Each structure stands twice: as C-alpha cells, then as structure tokens.
Amino acid sequence: MLWSDLAIVLSARKHGENSVIITTLTREHGRYSGLVRGGSSKKLSPLLQPGNLLQVEWKGRLEEHLGTFSVEMETAYGAKAINSREKLTNINTLCAMCDLCLPERQSVEGVFGAILILLDMLDETRLWPEIYQRWELGLLNELGFGLDLSSCAATGQTGDLIYISPKTGRAVSRNAGEPYKDKLFPLPYHLLVDEVKPHKKDLLAVFTITGHFIERCLLGPINKKLPAARTRFIDRLK
C-alpha cells in the first residue's frame, strides 16, 4: 500500500531509540498515524511539531498496518508559535481536538481546509477565538451533530429564539423555553445574525455549548474528555 498526501501534524511520540510515531490529519485520507524512522534526529524532529503542514508518503504492507511515513516540510506553522504562549495554546488546542474527535482513516476534507485557514491566521490573535468557535460548530456539523437554529424545537416558530436545548441542539423560543430556562443554554445572538460581532461573553457561551455536545456526542461514546489544551485556551479567553 502506498499513497501521498498533504498532512497536518497533530501529535508525535517517541518510539524506540530514534523513531517517532506521528498522528496526522491528511487532506484525502483523514486522521492517519505512521512511523517516521529517524524522527527524533535534529534533521527531522523540527518537521514533526504539531501544526506543521507536511507532504507525506505512507507505506504499509496492508492498509490496516501502522505503516511508515516519509515527510517533507510544506509550511512550518509550528515555528510561528515558538515564541508566543498564546499562539502555542491555539495550535495545541486545535491539534488536540482533531486528534481526539476525528474518526480514524475517514476523509474530512472540509475540516482539513478549515484548519488550514486557522493556521494561516495564527498571527491574528484577537480574531482567532472567533474563528475557532466557528470551527467547533463546523466540526459538530461535519460529523453529523450540528446545531439546528432554524426554528423552535417546540413550536416551529422562527422568531424570538433565545435558547438552545442541551438534549437536541435545537433552538427554543422565549415563550416555549420560559418554564425550562434554567435547564437551557442561552443562544448567543451572533449565531443567528452573521453581521453581529460577538463579545467575549458570547464566545464563552458558544464554547460551553460546543463543549457540551462534543463531549456528549463525540467523546462520551469512546470514554474520553475534552483535552486540557482546550481548557487552557478558554481560561486565557476569560
């Protein structure tokens, strides 16, 4: 088995004396792991940092085997973050979320393209949380658990939507949600109107909502929790 692809490094761990096992998100093959021989060397180690975009070639006797990667640098996004704790937190959050949430060896080309946009905008530290919250919403949608904010889950009306159900991910109107408001998420207005710019409290509200559904729908079934990197990212935002 042999294929080539673009790949974003999500994580790397040492294997034996000189090799490294990397987990990547590839454009056409999804989340894929492989062994890089000599990966701990001075030549290859800088390439295998989380967030870097590589050109990879994967080889394996059978498709289900771990296989080996040969790698070449495309874009050293990790270098952009080396002297910035904030950028490093952003990269680590993005990579950890992909590593945990994305299915293995299933193409998610839309997610891959969105990650490249986030990596290209690492220098836009003030804008980055706003773009990243859209990415988490898109991740849920890509994997079949997107929020439905088109109409009230209880009445079908399309106006005065101010809540989100933690069970269904659907919007709930003011009147329908009033008896249960303590159990519902507040619906940040900027999710309904693109022209509205979110404030910090709006972003934090979105991260509470996306975190709930990511844990409930994606991580809960495989007995995993949201990564510590995401917690640090949100703590820096507060």
Image (cartoon, helix red, strand yellow):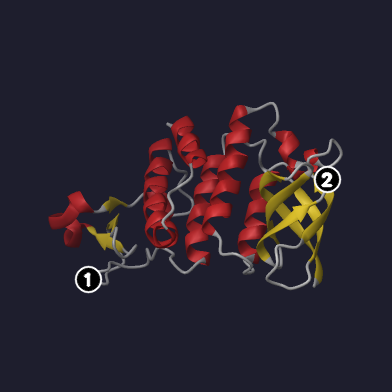
* Residue 223 as seen in the image, left or right of residue 4: left
Three-letter code for the amino acid on which mark 2 is drawn: Gly
Question: Label 1: few (<14), some or many (≥20) within 10 Å?
Answer: few
Q: Residue at x 67, y 35 (%)?
A: 123
Q: Secondary structure at mark 2?
A: loop
Measuring from the top left, give residue 93's x and y in whole percent: 55, 43
Residue tagged 1: 155
Q: Which residue is mark 2?
A: 38
Amino acid under label 1?
Thr
Label number found at residue 199: none
Considering every residue shown, the one lying at the far front of the view is 16
Report which quarter residue 114 is drawn in.
Answer: bottom right
Q: Nearer the viewer, residue 72 or 45?
A: 45
Considering only vertical position in the picture, is 61 above or below 236? Answer: below
Image vertical order of residue 113 relative to residue 74, above or below: below
Q: Is residue 122 left or right of residue 214?
A: right
Mark 2 or 1, closer to the camera? 2
The answer to whether residue 51 of the structure is visible from this angle is: no
Describe residue 47's horizontal placement relative to residue 192 as left or right: right
